[in-house]
Image (cartoon, rainbow, N blue to C red):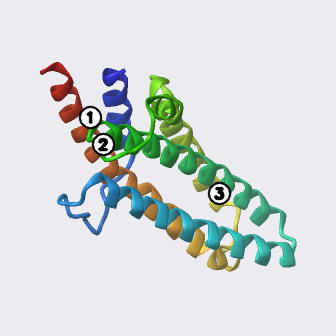
Amino acid sequence: MIAALFSSISLILASTEASPTPTPTSKNFDQLLDRLRSFEINRKAAIKTAVEEAASKKCNATGKFLEVIGEADDVLVNIRNYFEAGKVMFDFNKEKSNTFQADVVAKTQLLRDQNYLRNQMIRLSAILKTLEAHMDDLSTEQLIPLRPVVATLKRSEEALVPIAKKFQSDMNALQKNAIQ
């Protein structure tokens, strides 16, 4: 399972460009997860606004673009859920949690799927390529109201790099402690 996690994290690091505004490496996993959650809230709000605006203009190309954005959002939520499962596992192992072991097993089910994170990252990469192709179908006038959505999506994508690195680091530490 650990090897699969490492290959999934390597895929994140390879498929996501480095953030133009570097995240301090001193942030702990909980802070990075909170950051991912806040980006998700902002992304959903931007999507909602764009959908409402697109509905009033009734543009098919914009509608298709927003459908693809919705798919990317779903995948980003799945990835965040994976890291949420990691948080449950880390907290339980650090004895920071009052959760019963049976609950931990249920809440960390995503971690047992060796290819889950990797598959989600492959899906996200494909969706982002589709998004780029759909951008060519939109005029500059149609793209202007979509800029906030694209920007929040980009920030969410960039937030995956630091949390994936920290996840890998914490998994290494957990594995070392389990061996000892």
Other residues around mark 2 within 10 Å, as few (<14) / some (14–19) / many (≥20): many
Q: Secondary structure at mark 3?
A: helix
Q: Is residue 65 above or below residue 141?
A: above
Q: Are marks 2 and 1 in contact (CB under 8 Å)?
A: yes
Q: Which residue does the image show at 26% across and 34% down from the upper left?
A: 171
Find disc 2 in the rendering and name its residue.
Answer: 167
Q: Is residue 170 left or right of residue 43?
A: left
Pinpoint residue 127: horizontal percent, then vertical percent. Answer: 59, 46
Other residues around mark 1 within 10 Å, as few (<14) / some (14–19) / many (≥20): some
Q: Is residue 146 above or below residue 100?
A: below
Name which quarter of the figure residue 10 lies in: top left
The quarter of the picture where the N terminus appears is top left
| Amino acid at circle 3 | Ile
| Amino acid at circle 2 | Phe
Find disc 1 in the rendering and name its residue.
Answer: 171
Name which quarter of the figure residue 49 lies in: bottom right
Q: Secondary structure at mark 2?
A: helix
Depth check: 1 or 61 in front?
Answer: 1
The numbered dot on residue 37 is: none
